[in-house]
Image: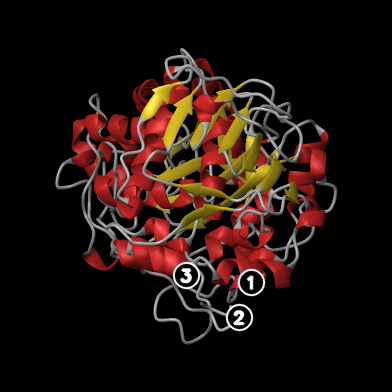
C-alpha cells in the first residue's frame, strides 16, 4: 500500500505484501446495517467504480448480505467471512479517530472502511478511490486489473475546516459549474465551499424581500461579462448537493464595503441616490450608510433569508477593504450586525479586518494578509477566537503561477505549487499557534476567470497542495513526496476532463 498515490498524505500507512485486493465482476459494496447515510456513501462509491470497470457492483445492507466483518480493525489486516469475500465494506463505529477519521484495511479478500461518523466513511472512500489505478476515472470501460494494494491506513485531519472559495460576484458561475467544482474539491477532502455571493459588480442570491437585487441578472461582472444569479431553489439544491459530498456551504454577504450592486438596485441604501453600476475591478469605494436604520433592516432581511436556506453553521459577513467606512463607523456596524447573524443561528465568519471591531470570541476571522505580524488578529486569538488561514501569498488561487500565466492577478506575488504547499498555518501570524487555527481555505476570485476550464486551471494543481496543508500533520508532509504523488494525479484529471496547469515543478506522468 503505497503512500505515493494518496493526497492528502494519510496519518499512518502500513503495507501488507501479498494482500492486494482485486475488484471483479462479483464485487459488492456492503454498508452499515440500517444506516441510510452509509448506504448513500456506498451508492456514491458504486457510481464512481461502475463506468470504468463495467461491473454491476451492487450496494447491499451488510446484514441482508448475511455477512459481518471480523478481524483486527485497528491492525494491518482484517479477515472476512465467506459472505464478504470480494466485498468492500463500509461500517460505522470503532474507528476511534474522530468525526472525519477512518481506518481502511485491505486484504486479498476485501476492503474494509470503518469510521465513527459518515463523514469519515466518505473520506475513506476518497482514499480508496486514489488507491485504485488512475483508469478508474475513465467514463467508459477499461479492460485491466483493478487492484487495491494490501495493508492498513489510519487517518484523520489536522484541522476541522478545509475550504475552497468560489467568487460568483465578479463573474457568475452556473449551478452546474458549481456542482462540478464541488465534486472536484471533495475528492481531496475539502469540506467547506465558501461562495462569495455579493460585491460591487453583482448580487448573486435571490432575496425575496428585496427582489430588485437580482433584477437584470443581478448586475454585470468585471469587464461587463458574467451576469446571473442563483434563485433560492437553485441555492438550496446546491447546498444539498454539496452536503451529500460532505461539503458545507458557507455563504458570504460582503458588507459594509463591496456593496455597490445593492446600492444600484436600492438607492435608499445610498441616501436616496442610485449608485452607478460598476464593471471595473477597483475596491474600497463603496459603503453602506452606518447611521441609517434602513441599513440594518436590509441586513436583517438578507441574513434571515440566507440563514434559513443554509443548514451549515457559518455565515460570512465579509468586512474587508471597507476603505470608505471610517473606523468608528465600521466598529459600530459590526457590533450591530454580529448579533443579527447569531440570532439567526449562525457563527459569524469575516475577513480579518473584522478584528478591528473587537468582536466576541465566537467570531471567526479569516486571515488573507501576507505579513507575519497582525496584532489585532493575535489579540482575537488570545481572547479565544479561532482563525481561518488564507494567506494571499500562499493560498489565493487567483494569483498567477508565473509572470507568463495568462489568467490571474499578481498583487500578492506569484504562487507556484511549491509556494502553495510549503507553509504552516500554525506559524503564519505571530501569536496565533496551532490551537488558535480553525483551518485553511483557498480562495479563487473571479476577476479574470470566465469558464469552468479557467476555474480548474487556476485551482489545479494548487488546491491539492492546500488540501494537504490542512489535512496532513507536518511530519507527514514533504515537498519531494508531494510532487511525486501529485504527478500521478494528472491522468486522473485528464480522464475526468479537468483542466490543469502543467507546472514545471512537477514530474508529470
Residue underneath mark 2: 505
Rendered location of residue 479, percent (x, y): 72, 70
Which numbered tag is attached to residue 490? 3
Tell me, yes or no, whether the two marked residues, 3 and 1, touch with CB atoms within 8 Å: no
**SS label for mark 3:** helix
Q: What is the C-alpha distance between the residues marked 3 and 1? A: 11 Å
Rendered location of residue 384, percent (x, y): 78, 31
Residue at point 45% right, 81% down?
Answer: 405
Q: Nearer the viewer, residue 270 or 315?
A: 315
**SS label for mark 1:** helix
Instruction: Tell me which label, 2 or 3, sits earlier in the chain.
Output: 3
Rendered location of residue 172, percent (x, y): 28, 53
Q: Nearer the viewer, residue 10 or 409?
A: 10
Of badges 1 and 2, nearer the viewer stands: 1
Q: What is the C-alpha distance between the residues marked 2 and 3? A: 13 Å
* Residue count near mark 2 (Cα–Cα under 10 Å), binned few <14, some 14–19, many ≥20: few
Tell me, yes or no, whether the two marked residues, 1 and 2, touch with CB atoms within 8 Å: yes
- Most extreme residue toward the left, as rendered? 216
Q: What is the C-alpha distance between the residues marked 1 and 2? A: 8 Å
Residue underneath mark 1: 483
* Residue count near mark 3 (Cα–Cα under 10 Å), binned few <14, some 14–19, many ≥20: many
Q: Nearer the viewer, residue 24 or 379?
A: 24
Which numbered tag is attached to residue 306? none
Instruction: Tell me which label, 3 or 1, sits earlier in the chain.
Output: 1
226 relative position to 259: left or right = left
Q: Does residue 425 show up?
A: yes
The part of the image, by quadrant, that contains residue 154 is top right
Rendered location of residue 390, percent (x, y): 62, 54
Residue at point 29% right, 44% down?
Answer: 203
Residue at point 54% right, 27% down?
Answer: 82
User: In the picture shown, does residue 163 fall above or below 302?
Assistant: below
Amino acid at each position: 500500500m503505497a503512500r505515493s498515490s494518496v493526497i492528502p498524505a494519510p496519518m499512518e500507512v502500513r503495507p501488507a505484501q501479498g494482500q492486494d485486493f482485486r475488484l471483479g465482476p462479483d464485487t459488492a459494496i456492503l454498508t452499515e446495517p440500517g444506516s441510510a447515510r452509509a448506504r448513500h456513501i456506498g451508492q456514491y462509491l458504486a457510481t464512481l467504480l461502475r463506468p470504468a470497470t463495467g461491473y454491476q457492483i451492487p450496494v447491499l445492507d451488510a446484514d441482508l448480505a448475511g455477512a459481518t466483518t471480523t478481524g483486527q480493525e485497528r491492525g494491518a489486516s482484517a479477515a472476512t467471512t465467506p459472505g464478504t469475500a470480494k466485498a468492500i465494506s463500509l461500517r460505522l463505529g470503532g474507528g476511534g479517530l474522530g468525526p472525519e477519521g477512518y481506518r481502511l484495511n485491505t486484504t486479498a479478500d476485501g476492503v474494509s472502511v470503518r469510521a465513527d461518523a459518515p463523514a469519515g466513511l466518505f473520506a475513506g472512500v476518497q482514499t480508496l478511490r486514489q488507491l485504485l489505478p488512475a483508469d478508474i476515472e475513465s467514463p467508459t470501460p477499461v479492460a485491466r486489473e483493478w487492484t487495491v494494494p494490501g495493508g492498513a491506513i489510519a487517518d484523520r485531519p489536522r484541522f476541522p475546516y478545509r475550504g475552497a472559495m468560489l467568487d460568483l460576484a465578479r463573474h457568475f458561475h452556473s449551478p452546474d459549474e458549481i456542482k462540478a467544482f464541488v465534486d472536484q474539491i471533495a475528492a481531496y477532502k475539502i469540506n467547506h465551499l465558501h461562495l462569495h455571493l455579493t460585491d460591487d459588480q453583482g448580487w448573486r442570491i435571490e432575496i425575496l424581500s428585496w427582489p430588485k437585487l437580482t433584477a437584470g441578472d443581478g448586475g454585470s461582472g468585471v469587464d461587463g461579462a458574467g451576469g446571473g444569479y442563483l434563485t433560492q431553489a437553485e441555492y438550496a439544491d446546491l447546498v444539498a448537493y454539496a452536503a451529500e459530498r460532505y461539503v458545507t456551504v458557507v455563504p458570504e454577504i460582503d458588507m459594509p464595503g463591496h456593496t455597490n450592486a445593492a446600492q444600484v438596485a436600492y438607492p435608499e441604501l445610498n441616501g436616496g441616490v442610485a449608485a452607478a453600476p460598476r464593471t471595473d475591478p477597483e475596491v474600497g469605494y463603496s459603503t453602506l450608510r452606518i447611521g441609517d436604520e434602513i441599513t440594518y433592516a436590509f441586513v436583517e432581511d438578507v441574513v434571515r433569508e440566507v440563514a434559513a436556506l443554509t443548514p451549515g453553521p457559518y455565515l460570512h459577513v465579509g468586512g474587508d477593504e471597507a476603505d470608505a467606512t471610517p473606523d468608528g463607523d465600521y466598529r459600530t456596524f459590526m457590533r450591530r450586525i454580529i448579533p443579527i447573524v447569531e440570532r439567526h443561528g449562525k457563527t459569524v465568519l469575516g475577513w480579518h479586518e473584522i478584528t478591528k471591531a473587537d468582536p466576541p470570541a465566537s467570531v471567526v476571522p479569516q486571515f488573507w494578509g501576507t505579513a507575519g505580524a497582525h496584532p489585532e488578529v493575535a489579540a482575537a486569538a488570545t481572547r479565544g477566537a479561532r482563525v481561518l488561514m488564507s494567506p494571499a501569498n500562499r493560498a489565493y488561487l487567483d494569483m498567477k503561477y508565473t509572470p507568463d500565466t495568462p489568467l490571474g492577478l499578481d498583487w500578492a506575488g506569484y504562487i507556484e505549487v511549491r509556494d502553495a504547499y510549503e507553509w504552516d498555518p500554525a506559524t503564519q501570524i505571530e501569536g496565533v499557534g496551532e490551537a488558535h487555527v480553525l483551518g485553511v481555505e483557498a480562495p479563487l476570485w473571479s476577476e479574470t476567470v470566465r469558464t469552468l476550464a479557467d476555474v480548474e486551471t487556476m485551482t489545479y494543481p494548487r488546491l491539492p497542495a492546500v488540501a494537504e496543508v490542512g489535512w496532513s500533520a507536518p511530519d507527514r508532509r514533504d515537498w519531494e513526496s508531494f510532487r511525486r504523488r501529485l504527478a500521478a494525479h494528472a491522468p486522473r484529471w485528464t480522464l475526468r476532463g479537468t483542466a490543469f496547469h502543467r507546472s514545471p515543478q512537477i514530474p508529470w506522468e
